Image: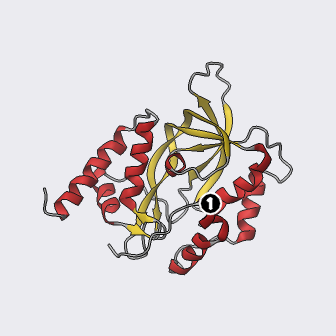
Amino acid sequence: MADEPVLPVTRENLSSGSLARLVAERNDDKTRLASDEELLASRRALVPDDADTSDIWVFGYGSLIFNPVMDYVERARGRIYGHHRRFCLWTRLGRGSPDCPGLVLALDRGGSCTGIAYRLNPDVAIAELDLLWRREMVTLAYRASWLTFHPDGHNDGAGKRAISFVSRPERENFAGPMTLDQEADVIASASGFIGPCRDYLFDTVKALEADRISDPHLKKLQRAVERRLASEEGVG
């Protein structure tokens, strides 16, 4: 793994454009990057500038749980149906490199997913969404979508509309199904300017456990990655 300075995902790095500049510098032209105009048009297509911002929720299933970087007024655990959490997105940038791509999570079709949803501060919700788009939609690899979120403890069955980020199988960076060992090999070896791919996995598992969310596959994946790292160090 090549060593390079790590630039974490923070409000400051997103707002200043520092992360965007690193993405552009590290890109090898095989990944198309969205322009500022495309990001704005994408957000407006889902949430217009004049939308009612009193009840806008964002559903997190991975890094938005351990590092939300959003101004929110309410946080709730719950489930969405019709999609599940999976390492189904290749990344040649933040958690990987052109020479050694990594994997990050997205919502893939089928099943269900338990995660954390955030109700954005109504006073700044549109600005928060623009910041979120800079973070999640820089390569347009996701489809930003309204999903139905069912908070724990709410039994009326209605659910809440929440924005989340769904995989796009037609995109070249979509990763099809893999074995556990194949996933572990990629995650153990890849790293990028945001940090090692393994930290993304470990931080997600830790955050899920802190919110008492069970994801047996990610736990198995973590153990498999840890075995590989120990083997590389000559420990196991």
- Quarter of the image for residue 181 reads bottom left
Q: Residue placed at 57% from the left, 50% from the top?
A: 68
- Apparent side of residue 171 relative to residue 184 in the rendered image (left or right): right
Element at label 1: helix
> Looking at the picture, does residue 107 appear above or below residue 12?
above
Q: Residue placed at 13% from the left, 56% from the top?
A: 236
Residue 116 lies, in percent from the top left, at 55, 39
* Residue type marked 1: Arg
Q: Residue placed at 75% from the left, 49% from the top?
A: 125
- Apparent side of residue 183 relative to residue 63 in the rendered image (left or right): left
Q: Residues within 10 Å of mark 1 (few under 14, many from 20)?
A: some
Q: Nearer the viewer, residue 76 or 31?
A: 76
Q: Is residue 138 visible?
A: no
- Quarter of the image for residue 59 reads top right
Q: Is residue 226 visible?
A: yes
- Apparent side of residue 17 relative to residue 31 in the rendered image (left or right): right
How many labels were placed on the picture? 1
Residue 224 lies, in percent from the top left, at 25, 51
Residue 60 lies, in percent from the top left, at 56, 45
> Looking at the picture, does residue 213 appear above or below residue 163?
above
Residue occupied by mark 1: 11
Q: Quadrant of the N terminus?
A: bottom left
Which residue is at the far top? Answer: 155
Picture colour scheme: secondary structure
